[in-house]
């Protein structure tokens, strides 16, 4: 799981152009959205949906569903582990 | 002298004249169809598309053919000389020939050259590409060019054709509805894209439809999400309402894309501007979102409606689904007012309002 | 009469990330922008005066180019076949540059994007003068941002205002300033 979490962090940094950040800067349970966490917005949610499909073969039809999955890196990793098709 | 509309033209799947399109809207027709595999797009989508074979002229792209044809018809309607150095051209589009990216010069500047070249006009055409308010911004630009001096007429042409590029983009934003769109409705869940071309010839005169004034304002909030307070739309409305009171307006023809946030935002802006008692209608359920053509297409049909003493119906609407009690015109209704406002909003946080009036209304 | 309050230019091929770190550094959204928007953002940072960050309706943002956002259009097109990218698609509109500048600085006035055949000081000047027919507009960020590729661009902008003490804004002063 640690490995998957790290992999997801690297993909987040790359896909969302989080300049200058390293996996260590992102807490496993830190919120990804809102002022507290990484400050991601609605376009980022959509890009994360693409990320899940491209890398793990997971299709999320509804962006609202995404909000739950993308709470934190740890939640994302659990979801990926349970639903990945590749 | 006022700045008035001297010639008009509309090309859509529902008709090739202003009258045909107006009659189709009055009948409650819609050009929205479901397409599968169109443009090589994997997911099916609902859109309003034109017949490419019918409209593509030899030596021109589909987009450029529509632009030239609708401009030609508007120029004929106005009876002006399109080659005159005192005639200017303004082209409104967002993506132009983008479907040919990688195959030829798809800059909007190239389409502008093609347009003026087709009429032997010596002035380089100006392209206004201001997201979904482009058509409205182009009409306002035409008004400004005439006020600025040096020209007798401005031909304002709006056109959009659809492609894999645009459809997949809106799909990636989860902005498309899988059914015909439902402006302002409680069950609305996204927009449909559309193809159309429309043109207006503006000039000086005393009679006919006057383009009174207009404004463009930014939400300064988010590049793809509308302001939660309707900031830009409200400010644009407030600007044109310097000239007229709510009681003199036949209706506000809104953007009404049928996305959750756009329609909600517009309802807030209309309320804040004191227009809650004015009928509101939207035409996206008929033609889809025709992007660069929308501002011109929807303005022309609104003029026709007022001339016929009507507020056009909002196809797709049945139950109010926004937070403010706006008076959405579900069915055709009568009006004796002689002015209307055209409202649009777009990506980049941009919003615009135009005021049209007839016979002194709104002047 | 319109006058020039400030002028800014970015040399072709400049390191935009380096410029960002020097000038701003506090706006991570910068890294999500396409090259044209980055150029617009950096120009507006250089032009910024005391009037920014407080919402104001009297400042317009008017941007001009020949290529629009075509450079980013190519990047988006590359993603279309497999996984169309929403974050690239939102930059496929020529006016997003005006929106990014408006959002950063809280300029709530008019924002407009125009495509011209080439940079022509007379035309540039007359279109900007026409925009000031809007009676609320008191000043405007007016730029030419021509992004041919991510490392090949022409980018400059003026802060123009009604009245003011600067040089008159006309074709001659535009030409002179741009070619300094």
Image: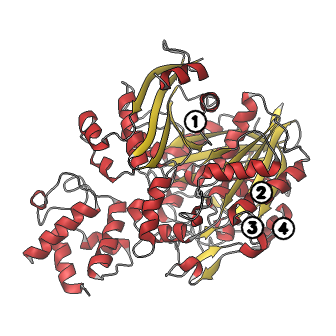
Residue pointed to by mark 4? B20
- CA gap between label 1 and label 2 equals 25 Å
**Nearer the camera: disc 3 or disc 1:** 1
Q: Measured from the top left, where is residue A59 in percent x and y?
A: 34, 81
Q: Measured from the top left, where is residue A28 in percent x and y?
A: 11, 66
- Does the image show residue B278? no
**Nearer the camera: disc 3 or disc 4:** 3
Rendered residue at 85%/39% (across/down): B84
Label 1 resides on the chain identified as C
CB under 8 Å between callouts 1 and 2?
no
Q: Is residue B172 left or right of residue B266?
A: left
What secondary structure is found at the residue carrying circle 1? loop
- CA gap between label 3 and label 1 equals 35 Å
Q: Measured from the top left, where is residue A9 in percent x and y?
A: 17, 66
Residue pointed to by mark 2? B68
Which of the marked residues, 4 or 2, is nearer the chain's N terminus? 4
Q: Quadrant of residue B126?
A: top right
Residue pointed to by mark 3? B12
**Nearer the camera: disc 4 or disc 2:** 2
What secondary structure is found at the residue carrying circle 3? loop
Rendered residue at 45%/21% (across/down): C180
Q: Quadrant of residue C27?
A: top left
Residue pointed to by mark 1? C119
Label 4 resides on the chain identified as B
Q: Is residue C73 left or right of residue B273?
A: left
């Amino acid at each position: 799981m640690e490995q998957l979490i790290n992999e997801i962090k690297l993909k987040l940094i790359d896909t969302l152009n989080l300049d200058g950040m390293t996996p260590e800067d992102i807490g496993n349970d830190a919120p990804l959205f809102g002022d507290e966490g990484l400050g991601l917005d609605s376009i980022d949610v959509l890009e994360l949906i693409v990320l899940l499909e491209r890398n793990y073969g997971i299709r999320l039809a509804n962006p609202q569903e995404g909000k739950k999955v993308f709470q934190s890196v740890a939640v994302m990793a659990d979801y990926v582990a349970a639903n990945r098709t590749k | 002298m006022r700045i008035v509309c001297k010639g008009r033209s509309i090309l859509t799947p529902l008709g090739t004249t202003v009258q045909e399109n107006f009659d189709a809207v009055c009948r409650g027709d819609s050009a929205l169809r479901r397409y599968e595999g169109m443009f090589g797009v994997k997911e099916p989508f609902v859109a309003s598309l034109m017949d490419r074979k019918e409209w593509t002229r030899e030596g021109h792209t589909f987009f450029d053919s529509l632009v030239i044809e609708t401009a030609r018809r508007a120029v004929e309607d106005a009876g002006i000389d399109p080659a005159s150095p005192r005639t200017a051209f303004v082209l409104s589009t967002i993506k132009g020939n983008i479907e040919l990216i990688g195959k030829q010069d798809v800059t909007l500047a190239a389409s502008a050259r093609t347009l003026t070249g087709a009429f032997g006009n010596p002035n380089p055409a100006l392209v206004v590409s201001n997201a979904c308010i482009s058509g409205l911004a182009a009409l306002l630009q035409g008004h400004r060019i005439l006020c600025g001096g040096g020209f007798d007429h401005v031909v304002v042409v709006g056109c959009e054709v659809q492609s894999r590029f645009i459809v997949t983009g809106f799909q990636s934003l989860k902005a498309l509805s899988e059914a015909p769109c439902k402006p302002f409705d409680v069950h609305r869940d996204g927009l449909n894209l559309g193809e159309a071309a429309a043109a207006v010839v503006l000039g000086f005169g005393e009679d006919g439809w006057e383009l009174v004034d207009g404004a463009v304002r930014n939400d300064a909030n988010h590049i793809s999400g509308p302001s939660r307070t309707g900031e830009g739309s409200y400010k644009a409305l407030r600007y044109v309402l310097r000239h007229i009171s709510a009681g003199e307006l036949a209706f506000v023809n809104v953007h009404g894309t049928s996305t959750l946030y756009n329609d909600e935002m517009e309802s807030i802006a209309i309320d804040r501007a004191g227009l809650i008692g004015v009928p509101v209608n939207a035409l996206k359920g008929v033609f889809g979102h025709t992007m660069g053509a929308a501002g011109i297409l929807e303005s022309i049909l609104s003029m026709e409606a007022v001339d016929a003493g009507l507020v056009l119906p909002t196809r797709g609407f049945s139950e109010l689904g926004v937070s403010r009690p706006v008076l959405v015109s579900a069915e055709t209704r009568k009006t004796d007012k002689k002015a209307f406002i055209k409202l649009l909003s777009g990506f980049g946080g941009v919003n615009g309002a135009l005021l049209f009036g007839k016979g002194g209304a709104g002047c | 009469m319109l006058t020039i309050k400030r002028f800014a230019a970015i040399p072709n091929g400049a390191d935009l990330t380096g410029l960002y770190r020097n000038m701003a550094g506090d706006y991570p959204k910068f890294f999500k922008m396409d090259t044209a928007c980055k150029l617009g953002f950096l120009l507006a940072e250089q032009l910024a005066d005391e009037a920014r960050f407080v919402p104001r309706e009297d400042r317009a943002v008017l941007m001009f180019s020949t290529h629009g956002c075509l450079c980013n259009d190519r990047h988006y097109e590359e993603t279309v076949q497999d996984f169309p990218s929403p974050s690239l698609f939102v930059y496929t509109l020529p006016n997003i540059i005006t929106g990014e500048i408006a959002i950063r600085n809280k300029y709530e006035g008019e924002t407009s994007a125009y495509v011209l055949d080439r940079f022509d000081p007379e035309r540039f000047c007359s279109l900007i003068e026409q925009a000031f027919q809007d009676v609320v507009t008191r000043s405007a960020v007016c730029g030419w941002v021509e992004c041919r590729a991510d490392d090949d661009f022409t980018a400059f902008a003026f802060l123009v205002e009604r009245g003011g003490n600067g040089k008159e804004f006309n074709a001659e002063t535009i030409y002179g300033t741009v070619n300094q």
